[in-house]
Image (cartoon, helix red, strand yellow):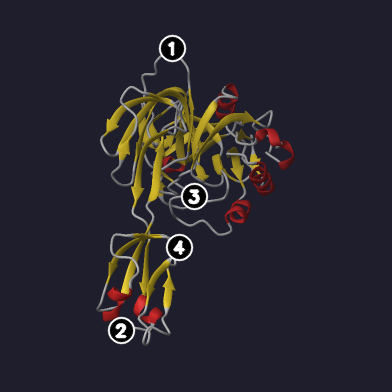
């Protein structure tokens, strides 16, 4: 049977999900292998050196650089509070002395009698890493972090913005064809991961931020709405660091696109369960996809492990999504995989496939124009 390999998204009802939770610099791991952890539980922490504040003290006091060490009220290694006296000049016969207050809280790191400059190191910045999902500590990475493992429902979106967050899953629209409009959100959705079937309106995001919604999952979004939400055009980059007050995950694409029925029904079956989401996306390159993870309390163990990016063998019967115009966002099933390249409308040659779309039409498209949609 003809087949090929193609990238795709995973949509799994139950899978073994493993995630590395590591610190950016060396630190302390505060859990042990085998420990049960909750999604928001801190598993590792460290301190990043504080910011550096240079002060040209010679200029501030009106003295020569060589007089700075003698003028200092605190010495190297000593701490000082913002507003406390950092240095005082000798003045003239004890009069007309200039003082200088510390512009920040920190520790004196260095001083120079050549440049007259003093360096104040700010207070250490605490960094903590949580488990992201509820599960078991499968592996401890000494001084780095842990690997957390759990049985979970796992879904990848096509695009997202905003970072990691958690909350109970709430289905807002009764069907995947209905838009998520502002009037559907109430104060009861504060802290929740809400799911709307079709397009997410810009006003809905604003309303969700007012309420305190943790994340929104929807089928599509208009590109103008996305620009309004961000305040700028999103270029080719990694998303996930945006500070917009919530996380936004799109499962299908841009425009008026209903969420895939299988995706919606799976999320609906998980309503009320604690859910972890991450909107980080590598645009175009497909290295990172936004994730929706719902830890399951199940006695059966999954045999498959979730990967960060889906993909697999494309063959007759595979479920796919068309990802290029004029069929962007349409779901269907591979009906045929011709082995020989065919001439396209543009005049170029490419390997193609026939897709039986959910609306009944049959289309011929280049294989590069589809991605797999993982089966449950």
Q: Nearer the viewer, mark 4 or mark 1?
A: 4
Q: Position of residue 320 (x, y in %)?
A: 48, 33
Q: CA distance from mark 2 to mark 4?
A: 24 Å
Residue 328 visible, this orientation: no
Q: Which residue position is annotated with label 3? A: 345
Q: Which residue position is annotated with label 1? A: 299
**Dots 2, 4 in contact, CB < 8 A:** no
Q: Nearer the viewer, mark 1 or mark 3?
A: 1
Place residue 146 in its image quadrant: top left
Q: Earlier in the sequence, mark 4 or mark 1?
A: 4
Residue nearer the viewer, 27 or 250: 27
Q: Nearer the viewer, mark 3 or mark 2?
A: 2
Residue at (67% x, 29% y) in the render: 175
Q: CA distance from mark 1 to mark 3?
A: 53 Å
User: Which element type, helix, strand or loop, lies under badge 1?
Assistant: loop
User: Which element type, helix, strand or loop, lies under badge 3?
Assistant: loop
Give the answer, above or below, for where 84 lies relative to 197: below
Q: Which residue position is annotated with label 2? A: 64
Query: Is 93 left, or right, of 241 in this rendering?
Result: left
Q: Earlier in the sequence, mark 1 or mark 3?
A: 1
Q: Residue furthest bottom?
A: 92
User: Which element type, helix, strand or loop, lies under badge 4?
Assistant: loop
Q: Earlier in the sequence, mark 2 or mark 4?
A: 2
Place residue 64 in its image quadrant: bottom left
Q: Quadrant of the N terminus?
A: top left
Q: Residues within 10 Å of mark 3 (few under 14, many from 20)?
A: few
User: Which element type, helix, strand or loop, lies under badge 2?
Assistant: loop
Q: Which residue position is annotated with label 4? A: 82
């Amino acid at each position: 049977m003809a087949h090929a390999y193609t990238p795709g998204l995973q949509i799994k009802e139950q899978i073994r999900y493993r995630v590395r939770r590591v610190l950016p610099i060396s630190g302390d791991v505060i859990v042990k292998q085998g420990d049960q952890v909750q999604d928001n539980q801190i598993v590792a922490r460290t301190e990043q050196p504080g910011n550096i504040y240079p002060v040209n003290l010679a200029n501030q006091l009106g003295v020569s650089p060589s007089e700075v060490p003698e003028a200092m009220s605190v010495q190297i290694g000593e701490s000082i509070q913002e507003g406390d006296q950092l240095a005082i000049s000798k003045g003239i016969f004890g009069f007309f002395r200039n003082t200088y207050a510390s512009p920040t809280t920190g520790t004196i790191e260095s001083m120079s009698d050549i440049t007259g400059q003093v360096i104040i190191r700010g207070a250490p910045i605490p960094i903590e890493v949580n488990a992201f999902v509820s599960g078991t500590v499968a592996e401890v990475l000494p001084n780095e972090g842990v690997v957390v493992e759990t049985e979970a429902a796992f879904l990848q979106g096509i695009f997202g913005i905003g970072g990691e967050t958690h909350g109970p899953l709430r289905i807002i629209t009764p069907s995947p064809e209905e838009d998520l409009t502002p009037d559907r959100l109430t104060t009861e959705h504060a802290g929740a991961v809400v799911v709307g079937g079709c397009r997410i309106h810009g006003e809905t995001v604003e309303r969700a931020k007012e309420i305190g919604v943790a994340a929104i999952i929807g089928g599509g979004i208009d590109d103008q709405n996305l620009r309004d939400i961000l305040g700028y055009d999103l270029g080719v980059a990694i998303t996930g660091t945006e500070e917009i007050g919530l996380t936004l995950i799109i499962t299908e694409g841009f425009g008026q696109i209903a969420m895939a029925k299988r995706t919606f029904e799976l999320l609906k079956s998980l309503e009320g369960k604690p859910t972890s989401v991450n909107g980080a996306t590598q645009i175009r390159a497909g290295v990172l996809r936004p994730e929706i993870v719902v830890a399951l309390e199940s006695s059966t163990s999954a045999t498959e492990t979730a990967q960060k990016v889906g993909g697999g063998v494309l063959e007759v019967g595979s479920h796919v999504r068309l990802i290029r115009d004029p069929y962007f966002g349409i779901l269907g099933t591979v009906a045929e995989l011709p082995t020989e390249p065919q001439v396209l409308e543009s005049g170029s040659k490419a390997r193609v496939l026939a897709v039986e779309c959910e609306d009944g039409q049959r289309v011929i498209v280049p294989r590069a124009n589809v991605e797999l949609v993982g089966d449950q």
